[in-house]
Amino acid sequence: MVVNKNQQNRDLYSDSKTSTVTQAKTKIKKPSMYRVVLLNDDYTPMEFVIWLLEHVFFLNEQLSNQLMLKVHTQGRGVCGVFSYDIAQTKQAQVKQHAEKNDHPLECIIEPDNETK
Ligand code: TYC
């Protein structure tokens, strides 16, 4: 019987003629990403939405104005794309600020299929 060196060494430490080799697979996946989407309504003041975009999503004044107007005219707008935990935190912050100020503002999370 012809046995190579590695097989011989493995057999020295095992009591049978067969041995199992477990190889670690290195498969790294990027985390799934999620969009935080702001929805339009007829009651939340524009200034409040702009304030939120500046203070929760850290957009500058110009971008905040543009995005607020986009949501106002098109019904929805993406505030940012984040890992699931961060997206949930942003959504909770929007909800907290809106409820505290009695505004019906809604914000949803959806998978971002662009990122693979
Ligand atoms: N439509 C609102 C108004 O006319 C403004 C608004 C913009 C509300 C964006 C919500 O996500 C929103 N006052």
Image: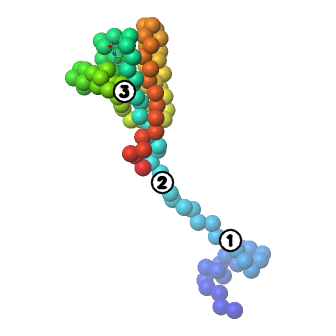
Q: Is residue 53 above or below residue 44?
A: below
- Tag in front: 1 or 3: 3
Residue 115 picture location, percent across and down: 40, 46
The disc, 3 or 2, on the residue closer to the chain's N-terminal end is: 2
Label drawn at residue 28: 2
Outermost residue on the left side: it is 62
Outermost residue, right side: 15
Kind of residue at badge 3: Arg
Q: Is residue 37 visible?
A: yes
Nearer to the camera, 74 or 58: 74
Relative to residue 23, is residue 95 depicted above or below?
above
Instruction: Name the residue at 36% across, 27% down.
Output: 76
Task: Count neighbours of disc 2 (C-alpha within 10 A) and say few if under 14, some if 14 to 19, many if 20 or more.
Answer: few
For marks 1 and 2, the one nearer the N-term is 1
Q: Which residue is mark 1?
A: 20
Q: Which residue is mark 3?
A: 76
Q: Earlier in the sequence, mark 1 or mark 3?
A: 1
Q: Position of residue 75 (x, y in %)?
A: 36, 25
Q: Position of residue 49 (x, y in %)?
A: 34, 16
Q: Badge 3, how many Cα within 10 Å: few under 14, some, many 20+? A: many
Q: Secondary structure at mark 1?
A: loop
Measured along the vertical axis of the image, is residue 89 above or below residue 28? above
Q: Is mark 3 within 8 Å of ligand 1?
A: yes
Whole-angstrom CA distance, mark 1 to mark 2, is 25 Å
> Residue at the location (61% across, 79% down)?
6
Residue type beneath disc 2? Ile
Q: Is residue 44 left or right of residue 67?
A: right
Q: Of 85 and 42, which appears nearest the observer?
A: 42
Q: Amino acid at mark 1?
A: Thr
Q: Which numbered dot is residue 49?
A: none
